[in-house]
Structure formats: C-alpha cells, structure tokens
Image: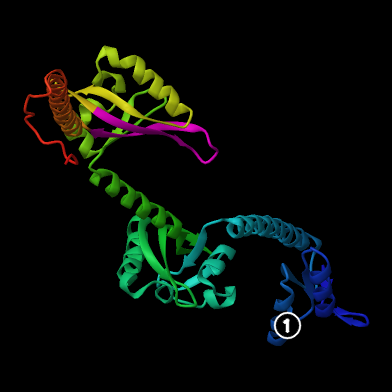
Amino acid sequence: MLDLILKGMDGIEAAEQIHDRFDVPVVYVTASLDEERLEKTKVTEPYGYITKPFEDMELRPVIEMALQRHKLEKALRESESQYRSIFDSATDSFLIFDTDGNIVEANIQACKMYGYPYRELIKLSGKDIVHRDYCHLFEQFKRDVQRTGEFHAESVDVRKDGTTFDIEVRGTLFNYKYKPHLLAVIRDIFERKQMEEKQRLFSHAVDSSIDGLAMGDLEGRITYVNDAFVRMFGYSREELIGNEIAFIYLADQLPKLEKALKATMDGGWIGELVARRKNGELFPIAITSSLITDDEGNPIAHMASHQDISELKKKKNKELELFNRLTVGRELKMIERKKEINALLEDPGKEPRYEILGES
C-alpha cells in the first residue's frame, strides 16, 4: 500500500521505482483523487485504490484482490514467455492475422523467410506477401478458417526482394489477445518441389526406357517394374510385384541367378540368362544389375536392366552359319586344287584346268 502523498517524494514517483525494480503489486491510498492525478497513476499500473479515511475491514478484500490479480498476471506472463519461446524457436513460419487478413504477429522464422524486419512485417496485409496469381487462395484461407476452423493448401509467396517461393500453408482459428484470429503455419517447400520434379523426370525416364527395368528388395522380391518389362515378360504389373524374381526363370538358370544376385550385393553384375515369358516361351536376356544404397551407404534394393537379345542371337547365329559355309567352301576348293596340283606333279604332260599367274 502506498500513499499518493509522501514526505519528500511524490507517491506516483515512488510507485514507478517499485514497478521498475520489484515485482510487487501497488495499491494507492489517498484522501482525494482528481481526474488528472488518476491519469498519472495509470502509468504505474496500480492494483487498486483506497480512499481515506477507511476501516480496517475495508483493507482485506482490496489487498486480497490485488494479490490474486498479481498472481494471475504473473502466471500469464510466464505462460506468454513460454509461448513466445516456442513461437520463435519453431522451424516453420508462424503468422497471426486478424479477421481482415492483416498480419498482427510473426515469429523469427517468418521474418527470415520473407526478408522483413519484425516491425515491418507486422504492418503488412497478407496480400502483400502472396503472389498475385494466388491471392484467391488467401481469400479462401480467411473464409475457410473462420467457417470451418482449418485450411491446407500449397501456394506461392513473395519475399521483400521480390523473389517468389513455393509454400505449404496450414491455417487454424486462434484466440489471440481475447479475440479470434487466424494462425498460418507456413513451410518453404522449394527443395521438396525440386525433389518431386527430379523424381517425376526419373520416373518418366524409367517408364519410357526401351529396356525392361526392375527393382527388388534384398530378399529378391520384385518391388517395381516399368512398362517395357511388363511387355517383355507378358505378365501384368500386379502379377510381377511381390513375387520372387526367380519365378521368371527355369530351374537350370537358378544357380547362375544366385551368383548374379550375390555379385550385385558386391556392387553389380553384367551377364546373360535365359528367361521365360508368361506364355512359356524361352528367350535370352542381357542383364546389367546394380545395388541401391541409402545416404549412409547401406544397401536397400537391387535394380536391373533387362534387354531381350533374341534377335541379336538369331543374327549372330545366321552370321556364324554364313561364315561356316564360306569357310567350308573355301576349304573344299583348296582340297580340290591340291588334288589337281598333285595330279600334275604325277603327270607333267597333263594340261592344268587353271593358269598359274606369274609363270611365263
């Protein structure tokens, strides 16, 4: 309790010092309180007033109320401090909007993401940081959060320097300073978008490959096949995935397949096997297999490229057959000529059937 009039000091000045130096609630005691003095006391945030003269019984409720209010406010400050600590330590950007879409609060990550100092950011409207082509989504964000209490979308926002970036935003209704507000949790998904694009291009390249590509787990079960593999073997994707890779080979090929899988675990394998299509047809395939590892270098899967070399084998067989015929023909001619030469040697007067070049 503090009297407004103190010897040698004004009570309001004393209350200011108490307020600045100690966490102690102040209740003013005064004989009279005009409007001007009342306004001055508000700066010190008093917890109550008692007018002189007063009875002792009047003090207790005023003091108890002051202490209770002080206790609640202290708890509230601690809670706000914890909230602020969590708010500012979040890796996502947090923005709080009023129901008109104006930014009223932002965490540290939001300031970094958008490139604005805190004081500038909380003076902006949401439309100031949203790309003009996506302003309709911001309007939807305001409507959905106020109507249903939630919102989720991907959008494009704009930094202070004018650069744009992809974001994912989740919205919810939020009670801030005793009034309904809109909380937006925003994540920069630029890297994720790049990764998705790379995966899309890789998937397109794999599916467009003329070679049959297949992936399998470390137990030898098929986990992925491309369109070329499906066409090559005649099975549907559903029939292939989940089966052991061995089921597309005859029993006599399994020892070589086991060696191929073991070599793949050691880094890779290149070779040929005879496979079987769904219709039972056997055909030769050239295989190049490799091991897939995670970021730590641990093996997680096999991948293999399969090329149907039936036509290549046929072409080589034809070439070999032609080569053999030509070779045999030459050898037969040589044998015939040797016989003629021998006959001439035995009978020098006999006329040869051919001319020996270089003889005069």
- Residue 175 at what x, y percent from top left? 49, 60
Q: Is residue 235 visible?
A: no
* Colour approach in the figure: rainbow
The quadrant the N terminus occupies is: bottom right
- Residue 189 at what x, y percent from top left? 43, 58
Residue 37 higher or lower than 288, as above or below: below
Q: Amino acid at mark 1?
A: Lys
Residue at the limit of the structure toward the top, as seen here = 251
Pick the front one: 67 or 136: 136
Residue occupying image coordinates x 60% and y 60%: 88
Residue 199 higher or lower than 104, as above or below: above
Q: Report how many numbered discs are placed on residues in the image.
A: 1
Residue at image mark 1:
40
Residue at the limit of the structure toward the front, as seen here = 349
Say which quarter of the image contains residue 275. Answer: top left
Q: Is residue 291 left or right of residue 355?
A: right
The magenta span reads: 285-308
Residue 184 higher or lower than 42, as above or below: above
Q: Is residue 120 left or right of residue 153?
A: right
Residue occupying image coordinates x 49% and y 78%: 161
Element under disc 1 = helix
Question: Is 296 a magenta residue?
Answer: yes
